[in-house]
Each structure stands twice: as structure tokens, then as C-alpha cells.
Amino acid sequence: MAGVPPEENGGEQMSFDEIIAPLAEEFKKEKRNEAQFRDWLEMGEERGWVSRMFCMEHDGPPITEWEATQVMHGNAPCIIGVRVLLYTEGPKIINIEEGE
């Protein structure tokens, strides 16, 4: 088993190839998943199901004409969003409203 010390592996020292092979396979699988996700996201954008990617801090979300009109009239329409996590070992998402 990859990353298992000799004392936990029946006393046998694992070769570099034995350790790296499962990790390399996992890396290849992750790259395939990333490519599939990118294709899926591009298809959604082309079909008008999702917006282009944007930085919430610097760009703000894209809004529709109706939403822009509402904002200009002093209203605050809900703009629904979903956070896309592109991290393999990224930060834990916290829910500020629940005080986590």
C-alpha cells in the first residue's frame, strides 16, 4: 500500500515504483476529471445555462437587464450563485451565517 511504513507493511520496504504508481494513477484520473469539468462548464456557457467565470471580489457577478433595472430603482433583487470549488485539497467552506 502506498505510503505505508515498512513496520506497517509486514516489515517489507516498498519500492519507489510501488509507492508512486497509485499516486500517478490518481493524478491521471484527477486530470481527466478536470478536463471533463472544463468541457461541461464550457458547454453550459455556450448554451446560456451558466455565466462566464468571474471574480466576486473584483468583477462582481454578471447580471441581467431586469436585475440592473431593479438595482437602478433602489431594489435589491436576489442574484443566485453557486461557488465552484476547483481545489483538490482546498480550504474548508465556512458558513458565516451559522458562525462556523
Image (cartoon, rainbow, N blue to C red):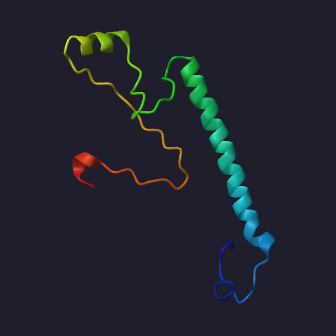
Question: In which quadrant of the rendered view does residue 55 lie?
Answer: top left
Q: Residue at x 32, y 10 (%)?
A: 66
- Figure label count: 0
Residue 85 percent coordinates (x, y): 49, 43
Q: Position of residue 64 (x, y in %)?
A: 38, 14
Front residue (pair 61, 89): 61
Seen at 60% across and 36% down, the residue is 37
- Toward which corner of the image does residue 4 lie, by quadrant? bottom right
For residue 51, above or below residue 28: above
Left or right: 61, with 97 as reference point: right
User: Split into 4 quadrants, where in the image is the N terminus?
Assistant: bottom right
Q: Quadrant of the C terminus?
A: bottom left
Q: Where is residue 12 shown, x and y percent of the image?
A: 75, 86
Q: Residue furthest front?
A: 58
Residue 96 is left or right of residue 89, and the answer is left
Image x and y of residue 68, in percent: 32, 13
Residue at the left extreme?
A: 74
In the shown orientation, is residue 86 left or right of residue 21? left
Measured along the vertical axis of the image, is residue 6 above or below residue 73? Answer: below
Residue 85 vertical position relative to residue 89 in the rendered view, above or below: above
Q: Residue at x 63, y 42 (%)?
A: 34
Q: Residue at x 52, y 56 (%)?
A: 89
